[in-house]
């Protein structure tokens, strides 16, 4: 039995993990070290960690990951991945405190569940789950084992997202009425391989298979993470129901035709995913959220991130604010630039970590996110994003698919906390 198995948690990782902080470096394993997994590994190696084991079924990925660990001056990790199930062997190692998984979406929940069952902290890439059963399995595994499960939703740590969180808490927006966000990112090059590790150029990747099969919001968590925190979802409020509608598709076929010829199988095949999906969610306290998902249109990246309260608004696409009684108003309300708000309301994590985070992934947010996860593992505390956030943000994938398939009928969003959201405290605002 390792430290983690021996440790007793109060209330299933929900009251915060118990036990004395680790006095040695945190030991982290990695599963799925493709594009994102190796970036997470590089990121983690900037902290005092050991990486005793990595798993991937692709040899190039295995070798690269082992090389990254050695290049950081650490012991070469043991490699797993001789079959698609070999990760299950790695989970049983006694020397890991945490496992970060970043493989295909459908593996996130099974890997996280087994990680928690084995008494280790789980961290998973986005979305953490693709079925409702996955979501409930993660909740149950966390509650029973007492181990936390953190979806690595890096947008929660974007500088503007944390600024807004701090300003919401300080009451600048009044009561929140509406949030809007979008995963609007042309990722057709991730649906169809460009060659290399993801398969022969032109073939459908594992990610593309989701777009072949399903129509809905397949990637909800980037905008929904920060919005969930702003609205105190699972911490005072909860999502009650949603409706979802998709436009017709065709964007992926056009992309395939342009790059691989109009008769290529990827150009002629049926992709179920509509080009623009819009999902509208209601909360119990009466706020609404619109979420966009557009991953197959030619367009620059934009997460929107708009928040409207009774006292003012932030519009992320413009990166501007307006507050009644505070912002200038001539005949009409006028937008204000964000600088003075950063000067006054910068989130303490960004105050403390912006120097170290400079130049790191996603404007530094990836560094801050990793810092927060590893800090929880080291201190044996609950992770800042817990299993309930992980489940409900990810659940929008299957729930939106269900609504679209039913002709946009309302679909209930379950309360994964089973009533505990009423008394759970809002996400803590703290420094490094
Ligand atoms: N948070 C972000 O900003 C961000 C950015 C990019 C990707 N992602 C997410 O990261 C995840 C990985 O995406 P990616 O672009 O790196 O994909 P990828 O295809 O480059 O990497 C996936 C890796 O998983 C490995 N794998 C597949 N089956 C496996 C198995 N059974 N056991 C072990 N390894 C296995 C593959 O060999 C591959 O190396 C996805 O969830 C994606 O959505 C998040």
Image (cartoon, grey):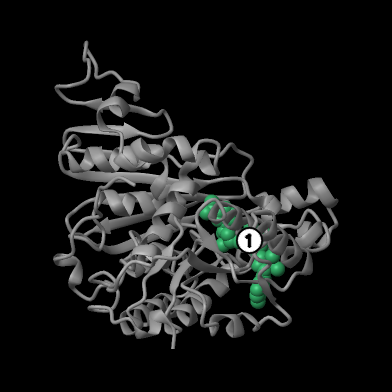
**Image: 8 above or below 17:** below
**Image: 305 above or below 247:** above
Question: Measuring 70% from the left and 64% from the top, which residue is drawn there?
Answer: 66
The quarter of the picture showing ligand 1: bottom right
Q: Quadrant of residue 337?
A: top left
Q: Give the residue at the far bottom of this rendering.
A: 1
Q: Position of residue 148 (x, y in %)?
A: 36, 71
Give the residue pinned by disc 1.
Answer: 74
Q: Quadrant of residue 180?
A: top left
Q: Position of residue 183 (x, y in %)?
A: 49, 48
Task: Kindly tell me whether residue 183 is visible in this rendering.
Answer: yes
Q: Secondary structure at mark 1?
A: loop
Front in this rendered view, residue 79 or 32 = 79
Relative side of 126 to 200, left or right: left
Front in this rendered view, residue 60 or 230 = 60
Q: Badge 1 local density, few (<14 within 10 Å), some, or many (20+)?
A: some
Task: Kindly tell me whether residue 208 is visible in this rendering.
Answer: no
Question: Measuring 28% from the left and 18% from the top, which residue is drawn there?
Answer: 334
Relative side of 19 to 424, left or right: right
Q: Position of residue 394 (x, y in %)?
A: 43, 65
Of the 4 image quadrants, the one containing the N terminus is bottom left
Front in this rendered view, residue 73 or 255 = 73
Relative side of 72 to 129, left or right: right
Q: Is mark 1 within 8 Å of ligand 1?
A: no
**Image: 81 above or below 355:** below
Q: Position of residue 147 (x, y in %)?
A: 36, 76
**Image: 330 above or below 182:** above
Q: Give the residue at the far top of this rendering.
A: 330
């Amino acid at each position: 039995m390792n430290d983690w198995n021996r440790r007793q948690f109060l209330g299933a990782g929900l009251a915060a993990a118990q036990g004395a902080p680790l006095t040695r470096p945190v030991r982290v394993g990695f599963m799925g070290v493709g594009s994102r997994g190796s970036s997470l590994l590089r990121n983690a190696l900037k902290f005092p960690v050991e990486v005793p084991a990595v798993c991937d079924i692709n040899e190039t990925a295995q070798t690269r990951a082992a090389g990254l660990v050695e290049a950081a001056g650490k012991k070469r990790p043991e490699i797993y991945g001789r079959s698609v199930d070999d990760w299950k062997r790695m989970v049983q190692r006694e020397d890991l405190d945490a496992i970060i998984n970043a493989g295909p979406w459908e593996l996130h929940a099974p890997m996280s569940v087994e990680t928690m069952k084995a008494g280790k902290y789980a961290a998973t890439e986005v979305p953490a789950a693709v079925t409702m059963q996955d979501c409930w399995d993660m909740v149950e595994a966390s509650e029973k084992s007492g181990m936390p499960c953190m979806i690595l939703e890096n947008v929660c740590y974007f500088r503007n997202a944390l600024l807004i969180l701090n300003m919401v808490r300080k009451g600048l927006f009044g009561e929140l009425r509406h949030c809007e966000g979008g995963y609007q990112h042309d990722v057709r090059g991730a649906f169809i391989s460009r060659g290399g590790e993801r398969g022969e150029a032109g073939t459908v990747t594992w990610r593309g298979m989701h777009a072949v099969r399903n129509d809905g919001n397949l990637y909800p968590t980037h905008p929904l993470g920060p919005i969930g925190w702003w609205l105190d979802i699972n911490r005072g409020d909860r999502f009650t129901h949603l409706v979802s509608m998709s436009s017709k598709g065709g964007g992926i076929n056009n992309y395939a035709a342009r790059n691989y010829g109009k008769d290529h199988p990827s150009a002629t095949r049926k992709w179920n995913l509509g080009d623009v999906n819009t999902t509208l969610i209601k909360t119990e306290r009466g706020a609404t959220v619109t979420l966009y998902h557009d991953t197959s249109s030619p367009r620059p990246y934009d997460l929107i991130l708009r928040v409207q309260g009774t006292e003012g608004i932030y519009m992320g696409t413009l990166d501007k604010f307006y507050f009644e009684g505070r912002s200038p108003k001539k005949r009409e309300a006028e937008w204000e630039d964000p600088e003075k708000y950063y000067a006054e309301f910068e989130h303490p994590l960004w105050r403390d970590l912006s120097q170290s985070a400079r130049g790191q992934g996603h404007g530094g947010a990836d560094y801050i996110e990793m810092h927060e996860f590893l800090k929880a593992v080291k201190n044996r505390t609950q992770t800042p994003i817990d299993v309930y956030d992980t489940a409900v943000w990810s659940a929008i994938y299957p729930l939106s698919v269900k609504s679209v398939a039913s002709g946009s009928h309302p679909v209930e969003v379950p309360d994964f906390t089973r009533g505990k959201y009423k008394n759970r405290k809002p996400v803590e605002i703290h420094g490094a």
